[in-house]
Image (tube, rainbow, N blue to C red):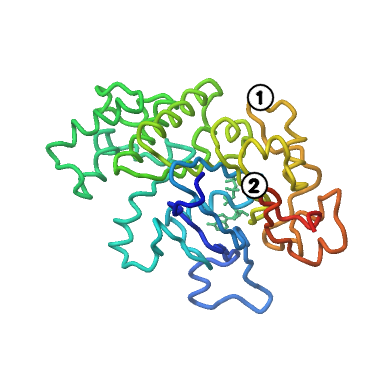
């Protein structure tokens, strides 16, 4: 990472709150009684994140910690409750919708389940080729050649362009999803558990494809995963989230060699066979608290072996404890 260059994408003090427990109709009709109240999920709570050109940032944490919500806000699929989003130095949400849509074509998202995100009634020719034609990047007469080129780039036979999604294997569908994202010439890919649904052997192939594409196409990635093995393999920098907040951020080698935050340490301790295969965050001691009612102070304090009175009273800020290594823990003073 070169901290002298401008971030490609930057989120500043971003939060997302979901209001639960009431459907839209009840809200409009205002029919809920005095006993019913809205429940607010604090999915993402004041997160700042800058991703620099060419970086691969791994975003990890237990299920429900807000990784997908953060990724969806980064690509503009979720609005932000608070905070701002900057793309190449511009506050992108200040633009009118049509201009914003065009500008944010440079940011694309790849989803966990390509089967669910690919229209089952469309052929690959259109799944991959529709957006670039709509956005005037290629003409309708160029679409076939363009899609064939993209299929080749992601390791699929160009002759497959007449097929429907169900005619592919899981690994091939993942590649179709990647081709679709690449079709609008993005610079930044947000990969949300992009290999989680695949067999381990296929995972390795698709991860290698991501690495090759990064080099060939100058891509930058935010790689969201609950699998430390995937993140270690791929990332330059790792950001650890816990219950909506970033608790640690450091170069990948440092996270794995000298984690600072007790949560990161617990994750690594619970993943002793890191090199072997998929690691899931199952063994951190204690229950994850509800994001409906997060603990005061440091969200991790009820599960933390080092908790002190200050930890339940005061939110720790992210402090730089070594060059480019940030941790939000009162143990650091
Ligand atoms: N549309 C929504 N409405 C209400 N709550 C939501 C919505 N989307 C996410 N949440 C809640 O926000 C919190 C964060 O969810 P999110 O999916 O971002 O976490 P995650 O870390 O990506 O988890 P996973 O790996 O299981 O997808 C969770 O408590 C989740 O239930």
Q: Are marks 2 and 1 in contact (CB under 8 Å)?
A: no
Q: 119 above or below 105?
A: above
Q: Where is residue 85 in the image (x, y as percent from the top left)?
A: 46, 61
Q: Which residue is pictured at 43% across the width and 36% down the height?
A: 114
Q: 52 above or below 32?
A: above
| Number of marks | 2
Q: Position of residue 115 (x, y in %)?
A: 42, 35
Horizontal side of residue 21 vs 272, given as left or right: left
Horizontal side of residue 158 vs 316, given as left or right: left
**C-alpha gap between disc 2 and disc 1:** 19 Å
Q: Which mark is residue 240?
A: 2
Q: Which residue is pictured at 74% across the width and 54% down the height?
A: 289
Which of these two is toward me, 323 or 214?
323
Q: 32 above or below 152?
A: below
Q: Residue 253 carries which label?
A: none
| Secondary element at image label 1 | loop
Residue furthest to the front in view is 4
Classed neighbour count for the residue bearing mark 1: other residues with Cα under 10 Å, few (<14), some (14–19), many (≥20):
few
Residue of label 1: 275
Horizontal side of residue 262 vs 274, given as left or right: right
State the quadrant of the C terminus.
bottom right
Q: 193 above or below 95?
A: above
Q: Is mark 2 within 8 Å of ligand 1?
A: no
Q: Earlier in the sequence, mark 2 or mark 1?
A: 2
Q: Is mark 1 within 8 Å of ligand 1?
A: no
Q: Where is residue 128 in the image (x, y as percent from the top left)?
A: 29, 37
Residue furthest to the left in view is 141
Classed neighbour count for the residue bearing mark 2: other residues with Cα under 10 Å, few (<14), some (14–19), many (≥20):
many
| Secondary element at image label 2 | strand
Q: Position of residue 113 (x, y in %)?
A: 47, 37
């Amino acid at each position: 990472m070169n901290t002298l260059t401008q971030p490609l994408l930057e989120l500043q003090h971003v939060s997302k709150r979901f209001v639960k427990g009431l459907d839209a109709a009840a809200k409009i009709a205002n029919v809920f009684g005095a006993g019913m109240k809205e429940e607010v999920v604090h999915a993402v709570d004041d997160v700042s994140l800058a991703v620099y050109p060419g970086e691969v940032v791994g975003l990890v944490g237990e299920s429900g910690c807000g990784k997908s919500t953060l990724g969806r806000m980064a690509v503009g699929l979720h609005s932000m409750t608070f905070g701002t989003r900057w793309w190449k130095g511009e506050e992108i949400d200040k633009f009118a919708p049509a201009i914003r849509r065009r500008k944010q074509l440079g940011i694309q998202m790849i989803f966990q389940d390509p089967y669910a995100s690919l229209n089952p009634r469309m052929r690959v020719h259109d799944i991959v080729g529709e957006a670039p034609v709509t956005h005037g990047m290629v003409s309708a007469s160029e679409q076939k050649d363009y899609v064939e080129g993209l299929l080749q780039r992601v390791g699929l036979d160009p002759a497959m362009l007449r097929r429907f999604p169900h005619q592919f294997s899981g690994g091939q569908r993942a590649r179709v999803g990647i081709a679709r994202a690449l079709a609008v010439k993005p610079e930044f890919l947000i990969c949300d558990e992009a290999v989680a649904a695949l067999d381990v052997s296929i995972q390795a192939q698709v991860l290698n494809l991501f690495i090759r594409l990064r080099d060939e196409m100058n891509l930058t990635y935010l790689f969201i995963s609950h699998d430390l093995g995937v993140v270690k393999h791929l990332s330059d920098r790792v950001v650890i989230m816990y219950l909506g907040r970033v608790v640690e951020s450091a170069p990948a080698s440092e996270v794995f060699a000298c984690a600072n935050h007790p949560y990161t340490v617990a994750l690594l301790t619970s993943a002793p066979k890191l090199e072997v295969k998929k690691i899931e965050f199952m063994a951190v001691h204690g229950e994850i608290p509800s994001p409906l009612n997060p603990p005061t102070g440091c969200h991790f304090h009820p599960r933390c072996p080092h908790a002190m009175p200050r930890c339940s009273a005061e939110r720790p800020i992210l402090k730089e404890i070594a060059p480019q290594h940030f941790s939000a823990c009162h143990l650091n003073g």
